[in-house]
Image (cartoon, rainbow, N blue to C red):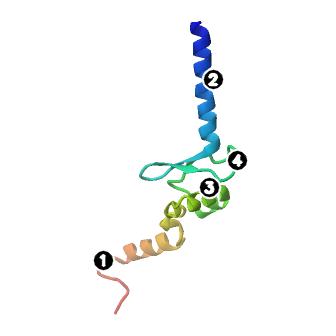
Amino acid sequence: MRRIMLCLFCFALGGAAMYSAFSYHVVRTPDTVVFVPRIDNGLKDTYCDIREWTLGEWRDHPGLIRALMEDGRSDLIVNPGTLNPFGDLLQQFRNAAGPGNSGRR
C-alpha cells in the first residue's frame, strides 16, 4: 500500500510540474524570478535567464516577448544598455579624454 501511495504522489507531482511548464514562462531577471502566463502551448522558453540578453537574443524569442507584453511586464523586454551599441564606446572616449577635458569650449 505504501508503494502505491508513493507512486500516486509521484504521478501527481510530475503532472503538476508539467502543467506549470505548459502554463508559465519562468523568467530570471536581474532582481527576481517572474512567472509569466504563456500565450502559446509548448515547452519553448519555459525558463529564460534574460539578465544579459542582447537584441539578437530577444529576436529569437517572439513568444516570450508577446507573453511579457500581455502580462504588463514590457519593462523587462530590453536592457537599456543594448539599445545604444555605441554607448560603451563613447563612454570609453570620454574616460580617455580625462575629467578636465570634456570636449566643450
x, y (%) of residue 31? Answer: 41, 52
Image point 48% across, 72% down: which residue? 87
Which amino acid, mark 1? Answer: Pro
Q: CA distance from mark 1 to mark 4?
A: 54 Å
Q: Amino acid at mark 2?
A: Phe
Q: Which of marks 4 and 1 precedes in the sequence?
A: 4
In the image, residue 20 sits, relative to residue 54, either above or below, namely above
Rendered image quadrant of residue 14: top right
Image quadrant in which you'd find residue 23 = top right
Disc 1/disc 2 C-alpha distance (Å): 65 Å
Nearest to N terminus: mark 2 or mark 3: 2
Alpha carbon distance from label 3 to label 1: 43 Å
**Disc 4 marks which amino acid?**
Asn
Q: Secondary structure at mark 1?
A: loop
Q: Nearer the viewer, residue 94 or 74?
A: 74
- State the residue position of label 3: 64
Chain-order first, disc 2 or disc 4: 2
Pointers 1 and 2 in contact (C-beta within 8 Å): no
Q: Which mark is residue 11?
A: 2
Q: Are marks 3 and 1 in contact (CB under 8 Å)?
A: no
Quadrant occupied by the C terminus: bottom left
Are there few (<14), some (14-19), or many (20+) residues within 10 Å of tag 3? many
- Is residue 47 among the parts visible in the rendering? no
Query: Which label lies toward us, 4 or 3?
Result: 4
Q: CA distance from mark 2 to mark 3?
A: 29 Å
Helix, strand or loop at mark 3: helix
Residue marked by disc 4: 41
**Residue contact between numbered discs 2 and 4, judged by CB atoms under 8 Å:** no
- Taking the image as shown, residue 60 lies to the left or right of residue 6, namely right
